[in-house]
Image (cartoon, coloured by chain):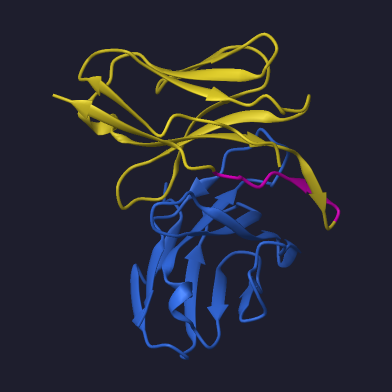
Chain colours: A blue, B yellow
Amino acid sequence: GAGVSQTPSNKVTEKGKYVELRCDPISGHTALYWYRQSLGQGPEFLIYFQGTGAADDSGLPNDRFFAVRPEGSVSTLKIQRTERGDSAVYLCASSLTGGDGSETQYFGPGTRLLVL
Amino acid sequence: DAKTTQPNSMESNEEEPVHLPCNHSTISGTDYIHWYRQLPSQGPEYVIHGLTSNVNNRMASLAIAEDRKSSTLILHRATLRDAAVYYCILRATLRAGGTSYGKLTFGQGTILTVHP
């Protein structure tokens, strides 16, 4: 079956601009996660959705970052007034229910964001 | 989050076994041990997980110390396609918004190089 998909695969923008990154999770997965990966580092948690609601947004770095999942499937990560430090790979993952610590997360290929 | 310690890099020859160690001395009783790997320019990929007992699947084996303070990921016959960054992760079960979930906290991982 289809895995997690993310669009665009690459995004180049200028400092101060607004960007939207999209994630299509695996069909039927209620849990959705966003992570950010800077060069040479492991991914860092940003936000977790259970259905339509953001149950844990403790990883969002500041109020320029916002994410939505209005119908409980596709999610959009929105970044306002982008800064050069926002340049990173943004990864989306989904899992069946969220569940407990044993549940597997399935990752998309990521969106590579470059802020000039 | 409980912390894991892995070697920065390891090397192996093709078709030889590889043992990737991970120390997690502060693991709590309910933390699951997960391993993910990340191939170049791809999102992380689930490899294996366990709680207390050793685990085997088609990709690898996971050996967990009796005191659970360390574990070893075993690739039985390395191939060139196994060259990746391997992450050892302790995954706790969290609760938020009335649901349970488990976010992944990645460290630096081990860069595995496989020589032909």
The image shows residue A34 at horizontal and vertical percentages of 57, 60
Horizontally, is B75 left or right of A25 in the view?
A: left
State yes or no: residue B47 in magenta.
Answer: no
Question: A89 or B69: nearer the eye?
Answer: B69
Q: Quadrant of the C terminus of chain B?
A: top left
Looking at the image, residue B56 lies above or below residue B6: above
The image shows residue A90 at horizontal and vertical percentages of 47, 63
Question: B21 or A74: nearer the eye?
Answer: B21
Residue drawn at (56%, 67%) of the image: A74
State yes or no: residue B99 in magenta.
Answer: yes
Location of residue B31 by image quarter: top right
Residue drawn at (55%, 31%) of the image: B5
Residue drawn at (43%, 66%) of the image: A88
Residue at the far top in the pictured view: B66
| Residue range (magenta) | B98-106
Residue drawn at (17%, 25%) of the image: B115
Location of residue B10 by image quarter: top left
Number of numbered discs on residues: 0
Horizontally, is B102 left or right of A10 in the view?
A: right
Horizontally, is A65 left or right of B73 in the view?
A: right
Horizontally, is A58 left or right of A103 in the view?
A: right
The image shows residue B93 at horizontal and vertical percentages of 76, 39
Q: Quadrant of the N terminus of chain B?
A: top right
Q: Provide the major secondary structure of the magenta segment.
A: loop
Residue at the far bottom in the pictured view: A16
The image shows residue A5 at horizontal and vertical percentages of 42, 60
Residue at the far left in the pictured view: B116
Location of residue A15 by image quarter: bottom left
